[in-house]
Image (cartoon, rainbow, N blue to C red):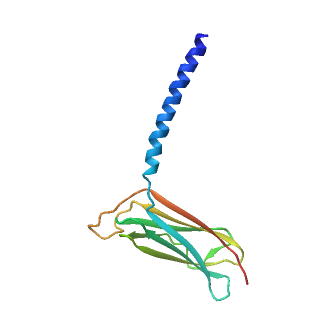
Amino acid sequence: MHALQLLFKTSAAALLLGLCLTLRTGTAQGQIQNVISANLTTSQIDNSTGYVITLEVSNLISQCIVVKTTLDVSDTVFFLYGNFHFTSCLCGVSTRRFFWEIDAPENGIITGKAQVVSEENICPPGVTISTPVYEIVITRDVIITL
């Protein structure tokens, strides 16, 4: 009987600890704000299997941030000039577009990623950089219609 009472006391303490941790992390999650937004678009080049991929990234805060953009594609999609990773400084509420040209002879999947990073020497000297942790991933299907 004594062992059973000890088990109930431990469980109540564990429940109280769990409740406190849940309440503590719940308030922190409420403070997360949207830092960037992104839009991924495709446009076909002259009825061919070539496409221009555009990843448009917008800074939604007034501070300067450094944004890294990447593009991942399925095995059926090929980069015409290379799969470049772009890193750029976005100051104030502003938008920047990043472009890739691909060849997609079959249907494929494209995933664009925009991520706020902490890198030096991207923004002009003397600019204060905000480095919140934030990432957006967008996936699009490329459907070939010839």
Outermost residue toward the bottom in this view: 46
User: Is 129 on the left-hand or right-hand side of 55?
Assistant: left
Q: Where residue 26 sits: x, y (%)?
A: 47, 44
Q: Where residue 106 sits: x, y (%)?
A: 72, 75
Question: Compared to 27, does 129 lie above or below?
Answer: below
| Quadrant of residue 108 within the rendered picture | bottom right
Q: Residue at x 55, y 75 (%)?
A: 82
| Quadrant of residue 53 within the rendered picture | bottom right
In this orientation, which residue lies closer to the viewer: 28 or 126?
28
Question: Compared to 36, does 104 lie above or below?
Answer: below
Question: Compared to 108, does 22 lie above or below?
Answer: above
Q: In which quarter of the image is the C terminus?
A: bottom right
Q: Residue at x 41, y 70 (%)?
A: 88
Q: Which residue is drawn at 42% across and 61% down?
A: 117
Outermost residue toward the left in this view: 126
Q: Where residue 98 sits: x, y (%)?
A: 49, 75
Q: Residue at x 46, y 49 (%)?
A: 29
Q: Quadrant of the N terminus?
A: top right
